[in-house]
Image (cartoon, grey):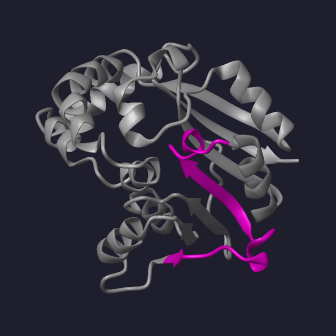
């Protein structure tokens, strides 16, 4: 998003639910001081192995304390909010972590009518509608800067195919697992999906990405990306 500021000295970014750490690492490459918090030990071990194996790049925290309040310029939480029963309450807590005028970056799945097998095995509580999402963010002390709906048309079609080829057999394997386990592994356990994504060459992916941008201002996609300022 163009709303992400150009890096300046001492800018601090924290990612909640960083999973494998790949998005957090992108902010590190942009020059931010990067911090991360995730409840999953598997996520912590994976991110440490991938990005901190030979150099200290990501500051991965196992706890948040009072010292984290008003400590960060940006907070990212991607595919996290839909896992939390009290989404309003957690947005208030995330707001406390940001400095004055700090930037919140979120991504969430779109449209409750699309709630299906993938949501179940990932431990999702809900999907979101744009109007309700705008209201939720505004009432929790943020001003929405930009919201886009991504994933139309091709990613939406691919999701349908993956649900048949991957999600149905995977759900059967997870039926006996509790919701906390599903949430903990959802950010790092994507091997089967990635296997199918490799079928398409990078140039085709780049073309599909350009096509979906034409539909960002519609409400046809599979998810929302939101940038909002603390007020």
Residue 138 in which image quadrant: top right
Look at the image and tell me in which quarter the N terminus lies: top right
Residue 102's x, y, as percent? 77, 56
Asked if the magenta segment contains residue 38, the reply would be no
Residue 28's x, y, as percent? 49, 68
Indicate whether 177 appears above or below 216.
below
Residue 112's x, y, as percent? 54, 19
Asked if the magenta segment contains residue 78, the reply would be yes
Q: Tell which of 132 and 1 is nearer to you.
A: 132
Residue 206 in which image quadrant: top left
Q: Tell which of 203 and 227 is nearer to you.
A: 227
Is 204 situated left or right of 90 in this image? left
At a point 45% along the width and 78% down the height, the residue shown is 57
At a point 26% along the width and 25% down the height, the residue shown is 163
Q: Which residues are magenta?
A: 59-85
Residue 17's x, y, as percent? 52, 57
Residue 97 in which image quadrant: bottom right
**What residue occupies the far front of the structure in this picture?**
176
Is 202 situated left or right of 2 in this image? left
Is 170 situated left or right of 86 in this image? left
Indicate whether 119 appears above or below 191.
above
């Amino acid at each position: 998003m163009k709303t992400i500021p150009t890096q300046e000295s001492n800018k601090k970014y924290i990612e909640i639910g960083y999973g494998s750490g790949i998005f957090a690492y992108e902010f590190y490459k942009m020059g931010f001081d990067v911090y991360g918090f995730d409840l999953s030990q598997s996520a912590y071990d994976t991110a440490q192995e991938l990005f901190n194996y030979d150099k200290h790049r990501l500051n991965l925290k196992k706890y948040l304390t009072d010292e984290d309040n008003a400590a960060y310029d940006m907070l990212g939480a991607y595919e996290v909010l839909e896992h939390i029963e009290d989404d309003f309450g957690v947005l208030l807590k995330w707001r406390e972590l940001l400095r004055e005028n700090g930037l919140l970056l979120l991504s969430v799945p779109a449209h409750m009518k699309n709630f299906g097998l993938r949501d179940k095995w990932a431990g999702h509580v809900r999907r979101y509608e744009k109007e309700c999402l705008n209201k939720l963010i505004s009432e929790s002390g943020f001003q929405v800067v930009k919201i886009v709906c991504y994933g139309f048309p091709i990613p939406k079609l691919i999701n349908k195919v993956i649900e048949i080829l991957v999600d149905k057999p995977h759900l059967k394997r997870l039926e006996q697992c509790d919701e906390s386990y599903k949430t903990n592994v959802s950010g790092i356990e994507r091997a089967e999906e990635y296997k199918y994504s490799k079928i398409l060459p990078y140039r085709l992916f780049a073309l599909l990405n350009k096509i979906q941008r034409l539909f960002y201002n519609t409400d046809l996609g599979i998810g929302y990306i939101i940038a909002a300022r603390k007020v």
